[in-house]
Amino acid sequence: MTLNTPIDMHLHLREGEMLKTVLPYSAKQFAAAVIMPNLVPPVDNKNRLIDYKEEIVQNSDNFTPLMNVFMKEFDEEELLKLKDEIFAVKLYPAGITTNSEGGVKSIEKIYSVLEMMSELNIPLSVHGETNGFVLDREREFIDIYKKLAKDFPNLKIIMEHIGTSEMLYLLDEYENLYTTVTLHHLLLTLDEVVGGMLNPHYFCKPIIKTPKDRDEIQKFVKKGHKKIMFGSDSAPHSIKNKLKGAAGIFSAPVILPALAEFFEGDLETFQKFVSDNARENFNINVPEKKVELIEEEWTAPYIVGNIKPMFAGKKFKFKVL
Ligand code: DOR
Ligand code: ZN
């Protein structure tokens, strides 16, 4: 199986040693990735963004980072300076997930930024959760997505890492809404987190939900829905921090072998999900890169540095060459 120019539309690489440890896994499997800005301090200005991009470029070959900047109350001058350097602006509601304390406290406060983004054709990427009951947080955010989609009809909005099936139906209701789906929300349920022995390594935000949610997400992805794009949300934390409760799943090492099994040889839909949908929806132009998978048993790594990857030790039918 050969994939043409796979793109991961949602990736956390961190910085420094951690970046050096995790980046090779994404650079091997993907031509490009959208890089999330929730660092400490956040990537919320041009200088920081350029430096961070440079760090990624220096530590990879043949891999294009598409940079996201952390949402704040930008003025027009700042946004104009950022425009050619970024893929999107990422909106984190304040305190909703890892390193989001400096996020948005009230959506109204960024309406002028959204207006400018709409005019400048800069997409909005959203972590769509309220601070309500953990299993309802995404569902409660649906009304906010609807309001944003209506108030800014020319703004392309990405509902990131959806885990709640109702959100899938917004895609056909609102022309300007798109979504990313992760490997874990596609394949797992809450049972994998708390159904047997507690598994902190599968704890993430938004939390993985019910079999019904997973099955509906699978159905839409298998159908090849054009507005659904793969975004891993691979989010590495050291084992020590995971055991203290950090949210995030390090899925990068196993993505393409796991997806190859999921698509069961339907290369056409696989290709759309990991590349074509994103390239067409967002006019992404990155250097072409072919990634080959062969049918040969492959075992996912048990450990990568001080991080435990998703599906550690699991055997797969396909291997990335
Ligand atoms: O589980 C998550 N981990 N969800 C997020 O939104 C952030 C991410 C991280 O950066 O660790
Ligand atoms: Zn994320």
Image (cartoon, rainbow, N blue to C red):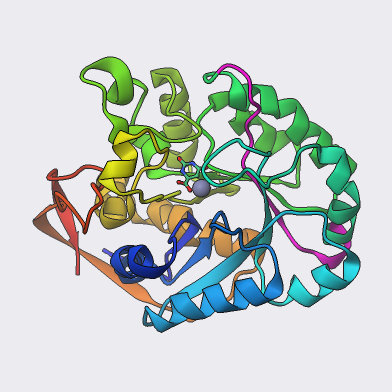
Locate residue 137 relative to residue 306 in the image: left or right: right
Magenta segment boundaries in residue numbering? 118-133
Q: State which quarter of the image contains the N terminus.
A: bottom left
Snapshot quadrant of residue 2: bottom left
Residue located 75% across and 44% down the image: 175
Q: Nearer the viewer, residue 249 or 4?
A: 249
Residue located 65% across and 68% down the image: 283
Can residue 290 be seen in this snapshot?
yes
Of helix, strand and loop, which mostly describes the magenta segment?
Answer: loop
Residue 6 in the image, given as x and y percentages of width and height: 42, 65
Residue 282 in the image, given as x and y percentages of width and height: 65, 62
Residue 306 in the image, given as x and y percentages of width and height: 23, 53
Locate residue 104 relative to residue 61 in the image: left or right: right
Locate residue 99 relative to residue 291 in the image: left or right: right
Residue located 12% across and 45% down the image: 313
Locate residue 131 relative to residue 161 in the image: left or right: right
Q: Is residue 242 above or below residue 42?
A: above
Can residue 265 be seen in this snapshot?
no
Residue located 79% across and 76% down the image: 81
Q: Is residue 131 magenta?
A: yes
Q: Nearer the viewer, residue 236 or 271?
A: 236
